[in-house]
Each structure stands twice: as structure tokens, then as C-alpha cells.
Image (spheres, rainbow, N blue to C red):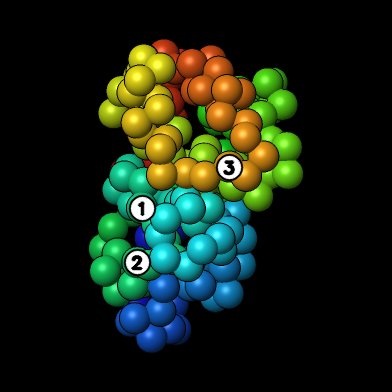
Amino acid sequence: MKLKVNNQTVQLDASSDTPLLWALREHLDLVGAKYGCGVGVCGACTVLVDGHAIRSCITPVASVAGSSITTLEGLSKDGTHPVQKAWDELDVPQCGYCQSGQMMSAVALLGRTPKPTDEEIDTAMRGNLCRCGTYPRIREAIHRASGQQMPALRD
């Protein structure tokens, strides 16, 4: 099947029920999304599909054919996406395992709410777990990135 990943059309030789996470990691060598829980509750596997944050560990690859998929690697080639820059400037990650999912959820939030309140951030990020407890830095980074021009992720 054909997928559009990070603005490139790719041919994928995988079963239609393969979880998107495994298609990205094992077939396309895009390892930004992480395996955390395998049941869609931790958020480590979050990617964007048509600008919406989804859990790739429970999403069959066939269900996103024809959609625009964006992974952490697709935000920018050099770390200059406003969310990536804010994360870096504020030293958000501690262990870093959950951070790609955190950033992808933040990008989805800022795509629909350019200047979110603390409550809107907390609500949008609720499904992304951070065992290191970097939630205050995550919120601060989202505020720092808010209001900046977000690059288009879809055609």
C-alpha cells in the first residue's frame, strides 16, 4: 500500500492490520515514535494524521492510507520547528522517552489553538504520560511555542 509520510509518498509492504507504529519504525526506519504501552494510553507513540494526534500503536496502517502522516522526523530536518526549539531552549526532556509523543501532541494542540491557556494545555496533554514528571517544563515550552507561525504539515 502507499502512504504519505512526512510529505513523501512511500510504498509499504506490510499487512493491512499492522500497527502504524511498527510500519513506521520497522518498515520505514522512522523511530521517533516510541513503543510504550501498546494499548494507546501512554502517548509515547503519538504521530499526526491529517494534523490530529493519534496513537500509532493501536492504529492499523490501512486505516491511514490516503491520509497525511507526520512523525517527529517530519517536523523539521534540523530541529527548527517552534515546538522543537522551545523543547530544546527549556531543556524539557529528562530521560526523553516520552518526548516525541509529547511534542507531537503539542503540535496538534497549537495547530488548532495557537494561544492555549494552561487548562487547554493540560486537557490536550492529559493522555501523554511522563514518568520523569517534566509536566511544568512541557507546559512552559508549549507557551513559548504558542503564537509562533507553525509550519504547514499537510499539503
Q: What residue sits 47% from the left and 44% below the top?
A: 128
Q: Earlier in the sequence, mark 2 or mark 1?
A: 1
Location of the C terminus (image quadrant): top left
Q: What residue sits 36% from the left and 15% below the top?
A: 117
User: In the rendered image, is residue 7 in sight?
Assistant: no
Is the residue marked by circle 3 packed among few (<14), some (14-19), or many (20+) residues within 10 Å?
Answer: many
Q: Earlier in the sequence, mark 2 or mark 3?
A: 2
Mark on residue 151? none
Is the residue marked by circle 1 packed among few (<14), some (14-19), or many (20+) residues within 10 Å?
Answer: many
In what element is the residue under mark 2? loop
In this figure, which residue is indicated by the disc labeled 3?
130
Distance between the alpha carbons at the discs numbered 2 and 3: 22 Å
Amino acid carrying label 2: it is Thr
Q: Nearer the viewer, mark 2 or mark 3?
A: 3
Mark on residue 59? 2
Amino acid carrying label 3: it is Cys
The answer to whether the residue labelled 2 contacts the one labelled 1, judged by CB atoms less than 8 Å apart, is yes
Distance between the alpha carbons at the discs numbered 2 and 1: 8 Å
The image shows residue 100 at horizontal and vertical percentages of 57, 45
The image shows residue 126 at horizontal and vertical percentages of 41, 38
The image shows residue 9 at horizontal and vertical percentages of 41, 63
Residue 18 vs 51, above or below: the answer is below
